Structures are given as structure tokens and as C-alpha cells.
Image (spheres, rainbow, N blue to C red):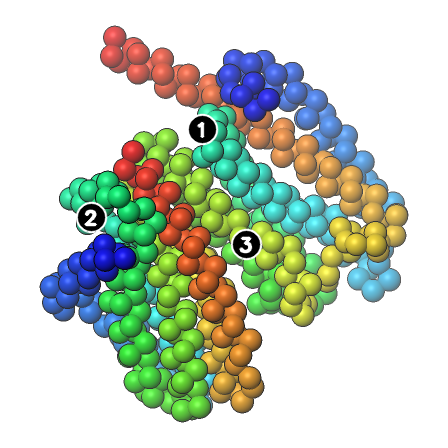
């Protein structure tokens, strides 16, 4: 199954068919989620209108962890099965993941100013997400630090797996430590403790962010494969 | 076991033959800490309050300073490949080199720490805990750092890259290391923080040599 997609030509054919669907799904889900979140969902009785930042903040934070997990999974696949596309997938995921992490930090900070009265607190959840941001940065720096791209990809794969220890720490930081950040209210035992009118736009936005990730990932993967082909053609021209 | 000791002894001896260069890490440690009274002012209460954090951060940076050389020279002159060809697993070679790194960097840092704590007016209640926490912490730092040192072999701008790779991974050790000393200074029990530091060390002991050996194999491909 995994090896079926190792063929770049088959991947290019398949991804060309999937990309428009992902783009369409992102548009529709995103528009629906934003409409429900910004206009239909009620304002919070304590937080007022600024609760609506949650519809971007929470999905972005989920995606930050999701991207790192996929990056680690792709890295493991690349190291174990030497899968050529897994290397590219891990490398293409990192810039998307760092953007989601940055978005989560920025929106959290914007929400924190009116709610907590401060842009930033050195709290377990916030600090561990900041560490995640630096892990992404280190990964991207290491990928590009070698003259031989294959060596960079392998070294970065090991780093992605080492850094994966941070993911469970972020996920459970609000349960383990007394944090200013509110505990999980959607993904927890005993079902979500959030009203359906707020849960619906949240889940729609999360779906939109996920399809957006796959859309951008596929576009980036296609670009990587094409640039690889161009490099091969140029080398052949140079060497005659 | 004798091969393990042999590699560790070789690395320690190499560090000592560099003369003053071998003590670079501890000199950096002392200098970095001494800068703080100039930066934040010589007020006694202020220095005493930040002393644990300052000493830990400086120890972190000092231990990172010498990491770049951990595998670099052996990689460049080819002795790393000979070490990889010996019948003993590469993980054990890494462990031996980490032991040597700790003996030449971690141990001098621990020895210098009480003196610096005195300079920063730390309450003497915290000294014993500072030493125990540094002993447990620097072991983990050397182990985690070995992964970074192995990953950057053959890269451009290795030193800067190394700090970007391993400083995020150092943060948990820093948090609990400072936490232990601060708890001792405030008169609370230090057992939980020291147990967590011990847990970090025990988790890093098998995992880090494994990861650095994997990185070394890729570097030598």
C-alpha cells in the first residue's frame, strides 16, 4: 500500500485529481465555519465578542500538533522504508506547521490581552507551544544546512522523531500543571462540554484547516517533484 | 566494558592535552555568570533571587559550547569510521564519548557552581541541592547534546545550528533544575523536582545514544 505511492508519476496523476477537491472543500468549509462562527454563534456571557477568536485559535493549535505528528510519522516512514515521497512530505509539512503554530501563538496573544490583561504569560501550555515553534525552526534549518539534500532530509528526520516527545507534553500540559490556559473542552472523556451552537463552527473550521493542510501539502509536494525533475534535466544538459 | 573505558579515557586525555582550551567551558561559565551583576546591578536581594536561574542558564550554554567538537574532529580525521567498525555497538561508543564530555565539562561546572552561588549571594541552604540538581541535569544535557552534535556533522554553520536544535530540548531540564534550587531556598521539599530530573536522565540514557548513533551512521554513509 505504502509502496504503491512511491511512484512519482502515479502520485502526480492522483494528486492532480485530488487538489481541486481539497481546494473546493477548504473554501466551502471555511466559508461555512466563518459565517457560523462570526455571525451565528452566540457571544460568550463572560468573554463577549472576543470569544470568536477561538474559531481560528483552537483549530490552528490543533493543526500545529497535527502537522508535527504527521511530520514525525512521515520521517519514521522515510527512515524505516526509505520511502522517497515520505521525505518530501515531511519537509513540505514543516513550513505549513510552523505557520499554524505562529497563528495559534498570535491569535492566543490577541485574545489574551483583553481577557487575561497581558499579551503573554510564561505558562506551561504557552511555553510548550513556543518550544514547538522552535522545534519547527530547528527542523527547517537542519534540512537546508547540508550541500547534499538527502543527508539533510535524513538528519532532519531523526530530529523530528526526537522532538516528538514535546507533542504529548503540549497536549496534556493543561491537565498536568495548573495552567492559566483553559483545559480541553472538546477532545476529552465524557464528550465535549461546549454548546452545539459553538461546537459546529469550531469543528467546521477544524475540518477546513485540515483540508487546507492537505491542499497546500499536495501543491508543495507536486512542486518538489517537478523541481527535482527540472534539476535532473539541467544536470543532464550540463553533463551532455 | 574495557573498550568503553578505553574510548572514554582517550577523550578525557585529549581534552586535557589541549591545556587551557580544555577548560574553556568552565571559563565561559564563570564569565557569563560574572556578567550578570554588571547587567542587573549589584543589589544583594536581586542577585540572590535570580542566582539559581542565572547559574543554570550559564551552565546550559557552557555545556553546549563544547558539544560541537564532540564528534567533529573524529569525523574529520576518519577515526569515527574506525570506531564504527569495532565489534562494539556504535551506541556504546556514543555513551563513552558522552561520559568523557560530562567528565571534562559537566564536572568542572559542578565544581565551579558553589563559588558562583557565593558570588551571587545565594542562601547556603540551596548549595547542596544546586550541586545535586546540576549533577543530574548536566548528565541529561550531555546526553541530549550528543544527538545534536551527531546531527550537525558535515553541515554548514554547525555551531549556530546546534544551539537552535538542542536549546528547545534543554528547556525541561532547565525548568526542573531551577525549580529544585528555588524550592530548597524557599524551604519546600525538593524531592519531586529531583525525581523528575532523575527521570529525564534515565529516559535520555537509552534513547539519546540510540538517536545519536542513528545520526552518526547517516553522517558516515
Q: Label 3, label 1: how many angstroms apart (C-alpha)?
A: 25 Å
Height in image: A165 above or below A21?
below
Same chain under badges 1 and 2? The reply is no
| A159 to the left or right of B3 | right
- From the viewer's side, name the closer residue of B106 and B168: B106
Mark 2 is surrounded, within 10 Å at the Cα level, by few (under 14), some (14 to 19) or many (20 or more) other residues, namely some
Q: Earlier in the sequence, mark 3 or mark 1?
A: 1
Chain letter of the residue beneath label 3 in the structure image: A
The residue pinned by badge 1 equals: A82
State the quadrant of the N terminus of chain A. Answer: top right
Q: Chain of mark 2?
A: B
Q: What distance separates the C-alpha of mark 1 from that of mark 2?
A: 28 Å
At horizontal 26% and vertical 74% (from top left) the residue drawn is: B108
Secondary element under disc 1, as helix, strand or loop, is loop
Nearer to us of marks 3 and 1 is 1
Residue drawn at the location 35% of the way across and 78% of the way down:
B36
Spatial CA span between label 3 and label 2: 31 Å
Q: How many marks?
A: 3
Residue B154, position in %: x, y? 27, 41
Q: Say which of B52 and B104 sits in front.
A: B104
Question: Relative to A165, is A1 above or below?
Answer: above
Q: Image quadrant of residue B81?
A: top left
- The spot of residue A205 in percent (x, y) is 74, 41
> In which quadrant will I find the C terminus of chain A?
top left
Instruction: Please state which of residues B60 and B96 is positioned toward the viewer in this rendering.
Output: B96
Visible residue check, residue A153: yes
Residue drawn at (74%, 57%), measured in percent from left and top?
A184
Callout 1–callout 2 Cβ contact below 8 Å: no
Q: What residue do we see at 32% from left, 39% from top?
A: B217
Q: Which mark is residue B74?
A: 2
Q: Which residue is mark 3?
A: A166
Q: Chain of mark 1?
A: A
Amino acid at each position: 500500500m505504502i509502496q504503491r505511492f512511491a511512484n512519482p508519476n502515479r502520485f502526480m496523476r492522483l494528486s492532480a485529481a485530488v487538489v481541486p477537491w481539497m481546494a473546493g472543500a477548504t473554501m466551502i468549509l471555511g466559508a461555512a465555519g466563518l459565517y457560523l462562527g462570526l455571525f451565528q454563534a452566540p457571544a460568550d456571557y463572560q468573554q463577549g465578542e472576543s470569544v470568536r477568536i477561538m474559531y481560528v485559535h483552537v483549530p490552528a493549535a490543533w493543526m500545529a500538533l497535527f502537522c508535527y505528528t504527521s511530520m514525525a510519522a512521515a520521517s519514521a516512514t522515510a527512515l524505516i522504508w526509505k520511502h522517497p515521497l515520505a521525505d518530501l512530505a515531511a519537509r513540505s509539512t514543516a513550513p505549513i506547521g510552523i505557520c499554524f503554530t505562529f497563528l495559534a501563538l498570535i491569535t492566543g496573544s490577541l485574545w489574551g490581552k483583553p481577557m487575561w490583561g497581558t499579551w503573554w504569560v510564561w505558562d506551561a501550555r504557552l511555553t510548550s507551544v513556543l518550544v514547538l515553534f522552535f522545534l519547527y525552526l530547528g527542523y527547517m534549518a537542519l534540512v537546508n544546512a547540508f550541500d547534499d539534500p538527502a543527508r539533510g532530509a535524513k538528519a532532519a528526520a531523526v530530529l523530528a522523531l526526537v522532538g516528538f516527545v514535546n507533542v504529548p507534553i503540549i497536549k496534556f500540559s493543561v491537565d498536568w500543571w495548573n495552567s492559566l490556559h483553559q483545559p480541553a473542552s472538546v477532545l476529552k472523556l465524557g464528550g465535549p462540554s461546549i454548546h452545539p451552537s459553538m461546537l459546529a463552527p469550531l469543528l467546521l473550521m477544524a475540518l477546513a484547516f485540515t483540508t487546507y493542510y492537505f491542499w497546500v501539502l499536495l501543491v508543495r509536494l507536486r512542486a518538489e517533484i517537478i523541481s527535482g525533475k527540472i534539476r535532473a534535466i539541467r544536470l543532464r544538459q550540463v553533463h551532455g | 566494558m574495557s573498550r568503553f573505558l578505553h574510548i572514554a579515557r582517550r577523550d578525557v586525555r585529549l581534552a586535557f592535552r589541549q591545556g587551557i582550551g580544555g577548560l574553556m567551558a568552565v571559563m565561559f561559565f564563570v564569565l557569563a555568570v560574572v556578567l550578570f551583576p554588571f547587567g542587573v546591578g549589584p543589589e544583594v536581594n536581586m542577585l540572590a533571587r535570580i542566582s539559581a536561574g542565572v547559574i543554570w542558564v550559564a551552565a546550559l550554554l557552557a555545556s553546549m559550547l563544547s558539544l560541537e567538537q564532540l564528534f567533529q574532529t573524529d569525523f574529520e580525521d576518519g577515526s569515527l569510521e574506525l570506531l564504527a567498525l569495532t565489534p562494539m555497538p556504535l551506541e556504546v561508543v556514543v555513551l563513552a564519548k558522552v561520559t568523557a564530555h560530562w567528565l571534562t565539562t559537566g564536572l568542572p561546572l559542578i565544581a565551579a557552581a558553589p563559588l558562583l552561588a557565593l558570588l551571587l549571594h545565594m542562601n547556603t541552604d540551596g548549595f547542596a541541592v544546586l550541586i545535586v540538581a546540576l549533577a543530574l541535569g548536566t548528565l541529561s544535557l550531555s546526553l541530549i547534546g550528543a544527538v545534536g552534535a551527531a546531527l550537525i556533522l558535515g553541515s554548514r554553520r554547525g555551531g549556530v545550528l546546534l544551539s537552535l536544535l538542542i536549546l528547545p530540548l534543554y528547556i525541561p531540564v532547565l525548568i526542573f533544575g531551577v525549580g529544585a534550587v528555588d524550592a530548597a531556598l524557599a524551604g519546600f521539599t525538593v524531592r519531586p523536582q529531583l525525581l523528575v530530573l532523575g527521570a529525564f536522565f534515565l529516559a535520555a540514557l537509552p534513547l539519546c545514544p540510540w538517536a545519536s548513533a542513528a545520526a552518526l551512521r547517516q553522517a558516515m554513509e
